[in-house]
Amino acid sequence: MITIGQSALSLDDFAELLFKHQQVALDKAALNKVNASFEFLKKFSSNKLIYGINTGFGPMAQYKVNEENILQLQYNLIRSHSSGSGKLMPAQLAKALMVARLNSFMQAYSGVHTDVVELLKDMINNNTCPCIYEHGGVGASGDLVQLAHLGLVLIGEGEVIFEGEIYPTIEIFNRFSLKPLSIHIREGLAIINGTSAMTGIGLLNIVQAKKLLNWAVLFSAMINEVVEAFDDHYSHELNIVKHHKGQNAIAGMMRDILKDSKMIRDRSEHLYNPDNLDQEVFEDKVQEYYSLRCVTQVLGPIYDTIANAETVLVNELNSVNDNPVIDHENHNIFHGGNFHGDYVSLEMDKLKIAITKLSMLCERQLNYLLNNKLNQKFPPFVNLGVLGLNFGMQGMQFTATSTVAENQTLSFPMYVHSIPNNNDNQDIVSMGCNAALMTKRVIDNSFEVLSIHLITILQAIDYIECRDKLASVSQSVYNKVRVIFPKFIEDKARYKEMAIVKDFLENSDSFIPKGK
């Protein structure tokens, strides 16, 4: 059970809720503050002109709404903005959105009735997720369209995803004896004004990006093993003179992985021998290609980018991000733009660029293994069959290359792609939800690339029959993956097996001890 409102949620808390389906509880003290915020708003808004309570919204705010229509105004807002299109978000993303919105409300600055947070809690605990579409939000007054679809479900309309199927909301509500929300004052505006869609998706992206980075470090270590690389490029002494936290963390991870490898060579033993000076052409390659030798320098900035994105997104998760802010403790209401998604949008753009670079590194390592003219160790395409008759990894490489190319195109930033809209009321916007969704696609693509990369490494290990010489971490991965994707010689369609390996990478916990 994870209690919301008691203290700030961490990324680990968020992952527990989304991946391990932990139940949520509402902190009683925080719930009392939510109620106090609501009661203050009810009293404060009497006989005052308050945006979004007795006025229209956005550029329509100059129009007063009559007393008898103020509750209908909130319903109209939810229904009119339930205008999303495109693909339905997976249930996991919709649940992430609900967790983020609930946590924002539990800060007690939104003026909502406690019915809202209680219903959100019950939906999360019953894994009942609103049907929310990918297209619609520009990320300025928050994720208006995506959150309107949440609001539509909360008032008992629209559709939900339950156990992988789509149902009318009211059917599932009736099954669990959930009562649709009745608007009290400003619940419509409070629900749709916020960054909870981009934040929820963004946090899931960070969880998966961390997994990708761990796998990329491990596969980089394994490829260094199979080519019997030298150990100095990930040594403490070489990396510590570069004062970047990420680079030194990656180097530490590689040292932890390879500490008991029997394949990695010590440069002093092989190249610093005076007898080598008599050779005109050295048999040993003096330095490895950059994709093998510069792993710490390439993956280090990615480590730092993920860490910074986590800090920013967790801050956003625990922030108040609607408008206006109902401050019951200072007895005032403050209007502004906390719903603006620039913090999230920028971090998602940086993250997708970083993950694209990660996929590019793995593609280059893959190409090195497949090109016998480069590695001078393995048959073309690590073909374990008959050259000319069989094809080895040739077909899979096309998939990896084209997928990395898509990542490169998707890496154009959304953060600088503002388009004014809403009668120019929203004259500069964040496109934060678009940025988060595109980052998710880059991450999904990268798991596909890494699955092909791993299969190739395992084939290379089998070709030189070096499994027993590998580091224990490498052996562990080899043994687990060979159960779901056995060594192959003959050609056959592999797309289903590739999907199984991708699923393994997406859902397995890290094999890697934390770097020192």
Image: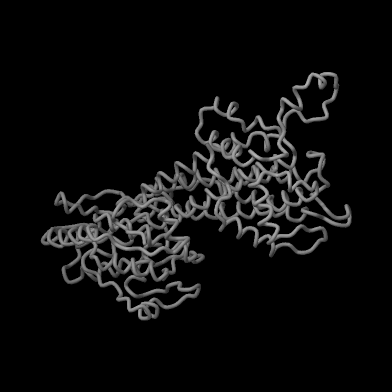
User: Is residue 202 or residue 468 the one in the foreground?
Assistant: 468
Q: Position of 409 compared to 42: left or right?
A: right
Where is residue 108 drawn, in percent x and y? Answer: 24, 56
- At a point 48% along the width and 64% down the height, the residue shown is 89
- The image's colour scheme reads one colour
Where is residue 342 drawn, in percent x and y? Answer: 40, 46
User: Is residue 36 or residue 285 the one in the foreground?
Assistant: 285
**Quadrant of the rendered image containing residue 488:** bottom right
Q: How many marks?
A: 0
Quadrant where the N terminus lies?
A: bottom left
Q: Position of 256 compared to 73: left or right?
A: right
Where is residue 217 drawn, in percent x and y? Answer: 60, 43
Viewer can see residue 511: yes
Q: Is residue 77 above or below residue 294?
A: below
- At a point 33% along the width and 66% down the height, the residue shown is 121
Where is residue 404 drawn, in percent x and y? Answer: 64, 49
Q: Position of 508 compared to 54: left or right?
A: right
Farthest left residue? 47
- At a point 83% along the width and 53% down the height, the residue shown is 384
User: Is residue 45 or residue 98 the one in the foreground?
Assistant: 98
**Quadrant of the rendered image containing residue 302:** top right
Viewer can see residue 63: no
- At a point 39% along the width and 74% down the height, the residue shown is 158
